Image: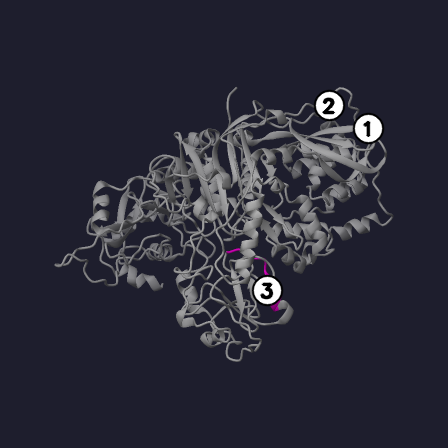
Amino acid sequence: MQRRGALFGMPGGSGNRKMAAGDIGELLVPHMPTIRVPRSGDRVYKNECAFSYDSPNSEGGLYVCMNTFLAFGREHVERHFRKTGQSVYMYLKRHVREKVRGASGGALPKRRNSKIFLDLDTDDDLNSDDFEYEDEAKLVIFPDHYEIALPNIEELPALVTIACDAVLSSKSPYRKQDPDTWENELPVSKYANNLTQLDNGVRIPPSGWKCARCDLRENLWLNLTDGSVLCGKWFFDSSGGNGHALEHYRDLGYPLAVKLGTITPDGADVYSFQEEEPVLDPHLAKHLAHFGIDMLHMHGTENGLQDNDSKPRISEWEVIQETGTKLKPMYGPGYTGLKNLGNSCYLSSVMQAIFSIPEFQRAYVGNLPRIFDYSPLDPTQDFNTQMTKLGHGLLSGQYSKPPMKSELIEQVMKEEPKPQQNGISPRMFKAFVSRSHPEFSSNRQQDAQEFFLHLVNLVERNRIGSENPSDVFRFLVEERIQCCQTRKVRYTERVDYLMQLPVAMEAATNKDELIAYELTRREAEANRRSLPELVRAKIPFSACLQAFSEPENVDDFWSSALQAKSAGVKTSRFASFPEYLVVQIKKFTFGLDWVPKKFDVSIDMPDLLDINHLRARGLQPGEEELPDISPPVVIPDDSKDRLMNQLIDPSDIDESSVMQLAEMGFPLEACRKAVYFTGNMGAEVAFNWIIVHMEEPDFAEPLTMPGYGGAASAGASAGLDNQPPEETVALITSMGFHRNQALQALRATNSNLERALDWIFSHPEFEEDSDFVIEMENNANANIISEAKPEGPRVKDGSGMYELFAFISHMGTSTMSGHYVCHIKKEGRWVIYNDHKVCASERPPKDLGYMYFYRRIPS
């Protein structure tokens, strides 16, 4: 063991009683069978308690179980001991002390600190001029709390020594890469020495860059062969882009590009498309000089403007984060921030809003003792435990304490105030809620609205008894479809969790200003001048609400009255009003070139919202319902073969089509489903599938393969009563529904396809139970089971009067890039939650939000 010499060669702790080797051996003998050496694949949690945010930096330190390698703070270690009987724990503590001052008043010269041996994920600056650190480790045996100081290599049994050394030297279960060593390991590109550069007269200006194929002005890459400026892909450096730089390489094969805005006299970010990794270019200065760029006079900025060239402009980044105002930090219960783990602000903003709702506070934090006491043996893998842990961390105030008076005085004296708000790290929570989800488990930016629906789904699936706090968001939507030819109507209901409002751009109240700004902007770009101050479209909220309630055309509508396709219109109304209304502004759309675009608009969102006029009224006098007749199911003779071809093998999915869609900014799993369910017909067909399905709650959920396995074959051949036709089952599953869901819907509607689809939409709480379905498929009396009337959706109906209490804002050009910030109204004042920083808001930008949270006003 490499660390053993350094670790166990340290002098022992002076505060522990010295014992003979035989005494320590006898003490450990009864517990030896429970002490394990971590194996490959074992997760060693030595940075964070499973039930709280205690760490070795906490006052009580951290206890690591020497059998399960789970960690517990002082408040929770006894619970684990009582539940499991595990007695031996390693106690870890990092002591922080102020450095001894020299004669002149300054800190003594720095020297290597051999007292730091814990490999921890912390934010501590171990080279701080003001503090020094010392790590402590010891074994603690419960229930008597007998302590054995480490190092103790001469007295401990060999197995215990090896186990302790392995625990101390283990890496964090969340650490994938050491960022400090990554940069030094960049390879030199094999194309750098003999790179061809075209003599095409291209010269790159010092500012005003934009992608040659779209209007993006961030994440821009300069191709070092022909001087093209194009946007990167969103996963190059966790920022947004439409992938035009990569497309350019695929078209022409020019291998190297440098990121504009990163060029300094010390180098720049260079990427090799051919080698598919960041690289070093030893001749970068020469390659840049070919396009008129002098590296020695460059300073890295995102937009290329030097400080003295920058014209003050009011961007959404400045307005939403309230830049330029002196924000007062907030401390105490409910004012705890969340550290950014790298593009995790979407999660932080949603969770801050969620735990400002009393129903979620009561369901989790209010039941903390019961949830923790009855948690599974590995609480890191339990949703309710981790939700409770996060809620307690945010609401208890334990991790949001104001600085002491002495600290404030010292900061004033030094004239270098240090940030006191550290917040809590949601690393364990994020790892659990995003597992098996390829998008949320990545370090890329995500859509806060998609994560909100993902979280609601997890709450639904992990409800605590009959209590389900997500019921406060649930409401019923009445959809009225009218056949334009016969004027007959059909009313259906579906469940939803948020209201999506379109942006009524045509209703902008400052159209003249917008036209003038656009002309000035184009002229400035043409003449390479700095851009004018931004003019943002002002949209009345009433116009967005009106656009929501307007009838919309139904494509490919089949009229049961005509027994043929016809024109149809659909209107949506609220069949019930939720207790908490979540409103999403549909700011993101796609241009004719498929490029994602964001509406940078200002909408006068009301503090008080009345939507009672959107209450559904059901079938009205004089209206005639459409006949309850299903459209004919046209199945060709080779239906089975065609369906099998349509539901392709997952290994045969066209990955090139998947990547084309992903480069547009769609979630990767949604792209895979689109290509899968359109039978590898190409990116354009799959794109149409995405447009139709992108507003569904499970749009970004992982692909679940509908199959033709044993259960289906057995059911088809057995000729059971009420067994739905296999062709109809296949049609429903090809739309993306679970096979078990299709079977139950068809049984409940006597195999009527149209009614079965209505049944599915009105029963979103259906939970797949494979054992139940297999039993039904093998039970000749399955029709008796299916006759039982299913439980209706759980809703909390009431008045349609609401009050705004929170909103989430997005900055950036795409949901796959940028930053999220949350504002919440607490104790009569607005508070801004910007990752770990929590401050009193001075100018809450309510007109620039993306998601709004309203609470019902009791009538």
Q: Which residue is mark 1?
A: 627
Whether pointer 3 and pointer 2 mark residues with C-beta atoms closer than 8 Å, the reply is no
Looking at the image, which is closer to me, 648 or 465? 648
Q: Is residue 673 above or below residue 300?
A: above
Q: Secondary structure at mark 1?
A: loop
In terms of sequence position, does the residue under pointer 2 or pointer 1 come before the other?
A: 2
At label 1, the amino acid type is Pro
Q: Is residue 504 above or below residue 40?
A: above
Is 279 left, or right, of 662 in this rendering?
left
User: Residue 798: within the magenta?
Assistant: no
State the residue in front, 294 or 530: 530
Residue underneath mark 2: 619
Tell me residue 709's x, y (percent). Answer: 73, 47
Q: The residue under label 3 is which amino acid type?
A: Leu
Dot 3 falls on a residue whose secondary structure is helix
Extent of the magenta region: 239-249
The foreground one among 246 and 650 is: 246
Is residue 494 left or right of 119 when viewed as pictured? right
Position of residue 294 relative to residue 629, above or below, is below
Residue 388, image x and y in percent? 44, 36
The circle drawn on residue 802 is none
Quarter of the view holding residue 473: top right
Few, some or many residues within 10 Å of mark 2 (<14, 14–19, 20+): few
Marks 3 and 1: in contact by CB < 8 Å?
no
Q: How many marks?
A: 3
First in sequence, mark 1 or 3: give its number: 3
For the residues labelled 3 and 2, the Cα–Cα distance comes to: 55 Å
Q: Which residue position holds label 3?
A: 246
For this orientation, the residue located farthest to the left is 103
Q: CA distance from mark 2 to mark 1?
A: 14 Å
Question: Circle 3: is it few (<14), some (14-19), or many (20+) Cα within 10 Å?
Answer: many
